[in-house]
Amino acid sequence: MSARTQGRAAPRTGRPGPLWALPGVVFFALFAALPMLLVAYLSFTHWGGLGTPAFAGLDNWTRLAGDPLMHRAVGLSLLLTVASWALQTPISLLLGVWAAGRQRGRAILSAVFFLPLLLSSAAVAIIWRALLDPNFGPPAWLGPALGLGTLDPLGGGGSAFWVIVFVAAWQFIPLHMLLYQGGARQIPATLYQAARMDGAGRLGMFWHITLPQLRNTMTTSSVLMVVGSLTYFDTVLIMTDGGPGTDTTIVPYLMFRAGFRSWELGYASAIAFTLVIVATLIALVMVRLTGFGSMRSTREGM
């Protein structure tokens, strides 16, 4: 290396300057922060969608705190979130780790697994509603064949809620599988080579190498699952319309019904703002508890 080169200042490394964040900040302010402030304002008003909102003080929030339907909707939303996480996480993790390997046919099967995510939520809901129709879907012949009579998974007996959990998993597991696939491919091969030399088996390498190396991916996937489950709506609207009864009336559906069927936009805004606060708090707690906020790399030497 020449003396002239040695005399030059070393290239600057590290994080980019704050101007790089400006487009993102402007986008967030216009399409996230501003609408949230508007919703917060409307939650203190009575408004039917026309005319000027009338200031109502804490009326909507008082009603929200004492509404038994809201309490049930919160419980169902939390149950949907927990059940979705418990079902989707292990399946996505195993499929993602498998897809990161070099098995024959892996690329084709990975593409097949990814197909549900290419469909819109409305299309997914229409497909599964037709498949589960008790008149002409598989339940029409499967129930009598098994001696169970006519099956109606969306009609009652508490099964409609679990059908929603299953359909959400069927639709979104491919997304999380893709996250785990990318994370698994970043794990240095030298770790597995060293483990093999020490006599570790596949299960041991998965438990002691793969899982710890994927902890940040798992946090990202879990936050996406939790926020997605708390805001799950269109599939519920199309498949069950919140029923039967209130069996699938989760918080986003209750917000829709208050805002666009009862035209109580002030009350619907209170529900929406509560949902934003709860989802944000849960995401922050998850990031805090998992140490994801420190953004420590799990890659070797980084």
Image (cartoon, rainbow, N blue to C red):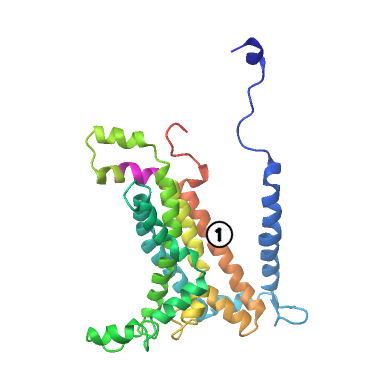
Residue 154 image point, x, y percent: 40, 82
State the residue in front, 29 or 75.
Answer: 29
User: Farthest residue in the top direction?
Assistant: 3
Segment tinted magenta in the rendering: 207-213
Task: Classify residue 153 as left or right of residue 29.
Answer: left
Direction from residue 204 to residue 34 in the image, left or right: right
Which residue is painted at 56% across and 68% down in the image? Answer: 275
Label 1 belongs to which residue? Answer: 280
Q: Callout 1 environment at 10 Å: few (<14), some (14 to 19), or many (20+)?
A: some
For the image, the number of numbered tags is 1
Nearer to us in this view, 254 or 139: 139
Residue 250 in view (yes/no): no
Residue type, label 1: Thr
Q: Residue at x 70, y 50 (%)?
A: 23
- Is 10 in the magenta? no
Query: Secondary structure of the magenta portion, mostly?
Result: helix
What element does badge 1 sit on?
helix
Q: Is residue 186 visible?
A: yes
Q: Residue at x 45, y 68 (%)?
A: 78
Give the residue at x 40% y 67%.
170
Q: Is residue 73 above or below residue 299?
A: below
Which of 30/144 is in front?
144
Q: Is residue 186 above or below residue 248?
A: above
Question: x, y (%) of residue 105?
Answer: 34, 53
Q: Quadrant of the N terminus?
A: top right
Q: Where is residue 173 drawn, in percent x and y?
A: 41, 61
* The image quarter in which residue 299 lies: top left
Q: x%, y% of residue 254?
A: 54, 78
Q: Is residue 232 left or right of residue 42?
A: left
